[in-house]
Amino acid sequence: MERLQPCESNLAEIFVSIDEIRLVTENGQKGRGMGVREPMMGTASPVSLSRFLIVTLGGRYLALDAESVCGLLTVDECGSVEDPTIHGMTYRAINLVDLLDIRNDQDGTNAHVVLLSERDARGSIQVTGVEGLLELQQSQVLPLPMQFRGPERHWYRGMILFAQSIALVLNTTWVLDEQASATGGQGNTLRCAKAPKISVDNSRVC
Amino acid sequence: MLRSSQKHRQDTIHQSWQLLVFSVGGRRLAVKTRDVSGVSYWHEPIPVPSQTPFVTAVIRQGKTVLPVFDLAAFLHLTVQGSSPLCLRVKHALGEMAMCIDEEIPVLHACDPAALQTYQGKDLPTEGSYTNGLDEVPILSISRFGSTV
């Protein structure tokens, strides 16, 4: 079992096996599996590397900063619960389709729920599919072209070249803020610091 | 004598406006060649959820990602042809792509004396010229995607 992500370095302990998640490369080839927060052993890297979980939604690639990803569940594992609650911590569902005003008519057989956390805010988003993890230099994150001059400038942190296409780097801070304001701040009421250890083995909550 | 004639011709060329004439939805439009960075085949755009009018996609050409200005939607037209073209234009905010009809664009040298004020108000232009019965607007690229 590999450690996917602690919400904050000394806060929640959430473990996820990511056997099904593969390290993907820009040309879409799958490499070896790797945990989002797998320790970087060996030679110290002279450049800072960032890791992104690449997901699909409505036929688009989205990149989620792995630092904000707490866990990954299948839709079946979530059951009929709208807001996944794991050991007392509620990850309120955030409807990205509505938030981004996109049409999602994709097949949902590979749908997953991604648990997100930043500081005190938590939320969950349902995505059509999970492509895998991508590790790259921060300089490889391209800025959104300046011609995009509406509120979408807050929605994305940039773009990543991915699989002959691009993946939009979702601004998870904005996503969680939107969820918090939509729920009157309820999404911020639980602190990760009190979270118990949770194991998610092969995307299953144990 | 020959040199003088060539110089005169070059001066004339330099004084005239070098235009690239293309069409969108069958409507003929022009743009200054100095505002054009290339014409290539159009590839399926990548949608980007956005609230900027007419800028809701990008195209990827190699490692370059360009925003797409949907000129056809702006003009309430539909691009014609099964193999549309990509017009890359230079813009103060960066290069931009537009999908145009598959009809191959042509170069046109326009005498400044033939330039006139564009009568329509549907497009930001730098003027227009008359070709037969058609008034061909010359697009003001700098005003697309920033004020439009």
Image (cartoon, coloured by chain):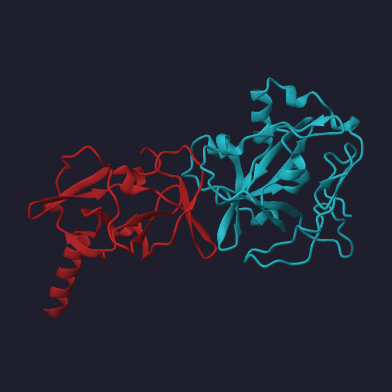
Q: Which is nearer the eye, B126 or A97? A: A97
Q: Is residue B57 left or right of residue B108?
A: right
Q: Residue at x 37, y 63 (%)?
A: B38
Q: Position of residue A177 (x, y in %)?
A: 67, 30
Q: Position of residue A202 (x, y in %)?
A: 82, 53
Residue most toward the top? A184
Q: Measured along the vertical axis of the image, is residue B26 above or below residue A95?
A: below
Q: Which is nearer the eye, B89 or A101? A: A101
- The tally of labels here is 0
Q: Locate the N terminus of chain A and report the quarter of the image it occupies.
A: bottom right
Shade of chain A as shown in the rendered figure = cyan
Q: Measured along the vertical axis of the image, is residue B58 above or below residue A13?
A: below
Residue most toward the bottom? B2
Q: Measured along the vertical axis of the image, is residue A42 above or below residue B124?
A: below
Quarter of the image for residue B76 reads top left
Q: Is residue B105 left or right of residue B40?
A: left
Q: Is residue A95 left or right of residue A88?
A: left
Q: Identify by letter the chain in red.
A: B
Q: Locate the C terminus of chain A and report the quarter of the image it occupies.
A: top right
Q: Residue at x 33, y 48 (%)?
A: B71
Q: Position of residue B106 (x, y in %)?
A: 23, 65
Q: Position of residue A142 (x, y in %)?
A: 59, 53
Residue most toward the left? B132
Q: Residue at x 74, y 61 (%)?
A: A23
